[in-house]
């Protein structure tokens, strides 16, 4: 989709976020909590939703948790002294979103609700060591041109997932796209979207014009859309673009978007178009670079013009391959036979 030059800019009703560990009212019955992260993306937005509970007493449902570290635990312990927590809703398996799920569910006696795929994916990463690095995964990175040292660095980063999570409780309530979720007086339409995560949950309060977008639609950055070694031919970017198109049809433009990173904003459809254009421009840049056969690693500087540390290299590499896989499926690139153990791509 092409965005008109006359398209209005996004509007930010809360131009300043709460301080890390702080909370503000972002809408009636919705509190916005900002938690710190030890990454380049240094924060995650958490939302508390006014709720009734299993015994009918008022309280607050929690949307996502932050990572499993001492400062984040301390924030939740402090919040629990002034807010009666009723349940936990997890949007997807990434540690900044459900890292403290196991601890919070046990400590505050909270039931967990999330999509089945996200629940099972997190359980697989936690309980299947091969999911976090194996000989086959090492071969995947080397085949795409990543050097031995960089491959080892990227491989070991995967195990950090265990250190940033506390597991999940042994049971959960499944959130299913097309159904609704009642939280206090609000009735949310449940939506899910792929690409960034397999079945990420988003919530739309149609009556109030509130859209809890998780990581799927962010105001200033595009979420990481990556191919990982356990599914090397996956097309997560195709899934993500289909999700953006579905959101345009399902969610009106005038909603207040409450994302998991950056600031809340108005201008959903404008931002959907910007994200679509962003990925189209990346595909154009890759096509030009692939006039000469290139490995996925050789495409990294085409899309990323700054130095990358080990953590960033893993995500950047996964994103490059997501674009390559999409373009192969679309017929604009060809995957060449492996030569000297390395796979290359060329414009079709």
Image (cartoon, rainbow, N blue to C red):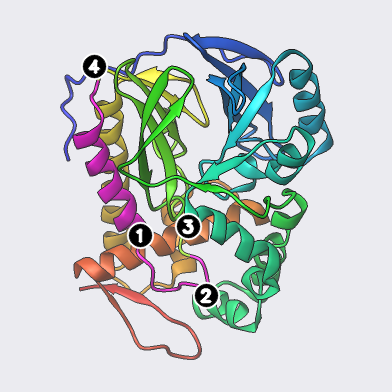
Marks 4 and 3 sit apart, C-alpha to C-alpha, by: 37 Å
Q: CA distance from mark 1 to mark 3?
A: 23 Å
First-in-chain label (1 vs 3):
3
Q: Does the segment drawn in magenta span residue 174?
A: no
150 and 9: which one is in front?
Answer: 9
Q: Residue at the spot x=80%, y=25% of the render?
A: 77
Which residue shows up at 66% across the image and 79% down it? 134
Can residue 332 be seen from the camera position used here? Answer: no
**For the C terminus, which image quadrant?**
bottom left
The residue to which callout 2 is attached is 145
Report how far apart the C-alphas of labels 4 and 2 lie in the structure: 42 Å
Q: CA distance from mark 4 to mark 1?
A: 28 Å
Q: What residue would you read off at disc 3?
A: 117
Instruction: Say which label, 2 or 1, has the lower sequence index.
Output: 2
Return the disc, 4 or 3, that comes first in the chain's sequence.
Answer: 4
Name the secondary structure under disc 3.
Answer: helix
């Amino acid at each position: 989709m092409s965005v008109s030059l006359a398209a209005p800019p996004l509007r930010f009703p809360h131009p300043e976020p709460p301080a890390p560990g702080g909370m503000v009212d972002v809408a009636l019955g919705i509190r916005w909590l900002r938690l710190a992260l030890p990454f380049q993306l240094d924060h995650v937005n958490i939302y508390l939703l006014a709720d009734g509970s299993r015994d009918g007493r008022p309280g607050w449902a929690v949307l996502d948790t932050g990572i499993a570290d001492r400062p984040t635990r301390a924030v939740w312990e402090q919040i629990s002294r002034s807010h009666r927590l009723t349940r936990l809703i997890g949007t997807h398996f990434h540690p900044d979103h459900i890292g403290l799920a196991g601890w919070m569910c046990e400590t505050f006696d909270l039931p967990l609700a999330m999509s089945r795929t996200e629940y099972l994916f997190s359980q697989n990463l936690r309980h299947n060591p091969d999911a976090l690095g194996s000989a086959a995964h090492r071969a995947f990175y080397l085949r795409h041109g990543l050097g031995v040292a960089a491959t080892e660095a990227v491989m070991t980063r995967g195990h950090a997932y265990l250190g940033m999570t506390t597991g999940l409780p042994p049971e959960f309530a499944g959130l299913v796209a097309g159904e609704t979720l009642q939280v206090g007086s609000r009735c949310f339409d449940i939506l899910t979207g792929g690409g960034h995560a397999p079945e990420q949950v988003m919530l739309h309060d149609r009556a109030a014009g509130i859209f809890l977008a998780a990581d799927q639609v962010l105001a200033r950055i595009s979420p990481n859309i990556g191919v990982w070694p356990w599914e090397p031919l996956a097309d997560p970017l195709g899934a993500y673009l289909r999700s953006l198109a579905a959101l345009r049809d399902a969610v009106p433009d005038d909603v207040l978007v409450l994302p998991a990173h950056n600031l809340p904003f108005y201008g959903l459809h404008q931002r959907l178009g910007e994200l679509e254009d962003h990925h189209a421009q990346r595909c154009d840049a890759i096509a030009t670079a692939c006039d000469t056969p290139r490995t996925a690693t050789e495409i990294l500087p085409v899309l990323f013009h700054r130095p990358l540390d080990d953590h960033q290299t893993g995500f950047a590499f996964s994103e490059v391959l997501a674009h390559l896989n999409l373009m192969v499926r679309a017929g604009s690139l060809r995957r060449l036979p492996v030569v000297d153990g390395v796979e290359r791509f060329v414009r079709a």
